[in-house]
Image: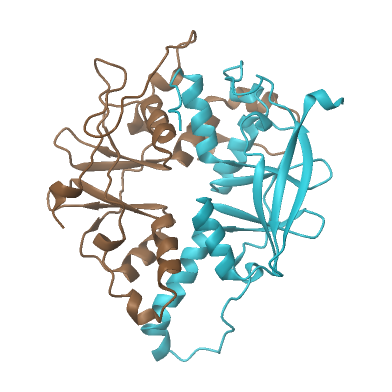
Chain colours: A cyan, B brown
Amino acid sequence: MSDVTKRASECLIHQGSGEVQRRSATSPAPTGGEGLIPSPTIAGLVPVTDIMTRSVICARSDLPIGELLDLVIDHGIGCVPVVDPGGCPIGMVTKRDLVEQLASLVHEGTLARLVTRSPRRPPATAEDVMLPVAITVDEHVTIARAAAVMAEQDLHHLPIISPSGVVVGVISSLDIVRWLARNDGFLPRDG
Amino acid sequence: MNPQQVRRCTVFHSRGEPVESVLESEPIVREMPYHAPEADRASLRTIMANDVICARADLDLAAVIDLMLSRRIGCIPVVDERRRPIGVITKSDLVQQLDADRLPASALTAHAAEDLMTPVALSLEEHATIAHAAAMMMSEDTHHVLVVSATGALVGVVSAKDIVGWVVTNDVLSVRRDASGSPLEWHPLEG
């Protein structure tokens, strides 16, 4: 495939050491051109790369939970893929995982103190809170298939991976809803 | 908190103009596409969650978190005594709480739903279509839209994931045609 049919994706990987590793990859370019509505109106005909987010914020498993939280809040994202040194996903942290941390915080103050439990190390890094399964879809699938995986797995976000397994994008349920709305003639509000 | 003060309830009407918003929101611009969108014919009632879990303004934080985690929901509407929505609590609101405090848990339990909620209830009428919900989610950048009756009482919630599920079932033929990617089979009729 020539470079004309590919477009750059960028993965910013936040590490425990405080460094941010920048990994670039390429994935198929949007079929409808830059900023255009993809021409087919059928989800089974539009590649997922047309609507995915190409700049992805990822974490390494040693990222402290506080920094992870800041990433989620500052960037307003719902999911942070956790990747290995090669950029391949090994897990995922979602907002729900963070809410669970809040729940344990709240309960520690009340119930948990009364119930004798085995002492547990409080979670410190991304690895401790992540869902240790990476449910991903390939960059060559269509919106319909990504939607099917999302619906079946009951997830709001899916990392998109290249054939070599590295993260090249993320698709959220809202991306699919936006695609539907634009397809049906609603114009996105500028800014 | 005075409900009148915080209420920015946007209501979309399904009759007359395709989409009309009241109060603060700008109307959403639409250019009718050449195809007749299926989403214009599908009522929100077919996909919305009817068994809505909502909170009164004085519900405490621990209860809100437990509801969200145990029922696997991402958004809890906050309603007044006449079941009219005055705001919503989302996972993001809770995650922000975790960051803002980073305090002993005893300080957290003092918060009530009222302090946590985003005092904006983005709502659609019961007769609205999936296209309206998708347009509202796109323009407001939100994963959840509330559904209210003619009297303004809450009757349902629609999430971006519900719309994704609808896209899947409506696009099922194209999913089966799609030979790329993982060998996922989708059988919507079984559910």
Q: Residue furthest right?
A: A1
Q: Residue B24: horizontal and vertical position, in percent?
A: 25, 34
Q: In percent of the image, x 64 and y 24: which residue is there?
A: A44
Q: Judge whether A142 appears above or below A136 on screen.
A: above
Q: Residue furthest top?
A: B34
Q: Residue B119: horizontal and vertical position, in percent?
A: 26, 50
User: Looking at the image, can residue B152 be seen?
Assistant: yes
In the image, is A155 to the left or to the right of B93? right
As rendered, which of B142 and B156 lies closer to the eye? B142
Tell me the quarter of the picture where residue B103 sits.
Answer: bottom left
As rendered, which of A44 and B6 lies closer to the eye? B6
Q: In percent of the image, x 45 and y 19: which residue is there?
A: B38
Q: Judge whether A144 appears above or below B156 on screen.
A: above
As rendered, which of A25 and A79 lies closer to the eye? A25
In the image, is B120 to the left or to the right of B42? left
Q: Residue B132: horizontal and vertical position, in percent?
A: 36, 27
Which image quarter is the N terminus of chain B in?
Answer: bottom left
Q: Judge whether A96 appears above or below A36 on screen.
A: below
Q: In percent of the image, x 66 and y 32: which residue is there?
A: A48
Q: Residue B82: horizontal and vertical position, in percent?
A: 12, 48
Tell me the quarter of the picture where residue A132 sits.
Answer: bottom right
In the image, is B133 to the left or to the right of B11? right
In the image, is A121 to the left or to the right of A109? right
User: Looking at the image, can residue B182 be seen?
Assistant: no
- Count of number-bearing discs: 0
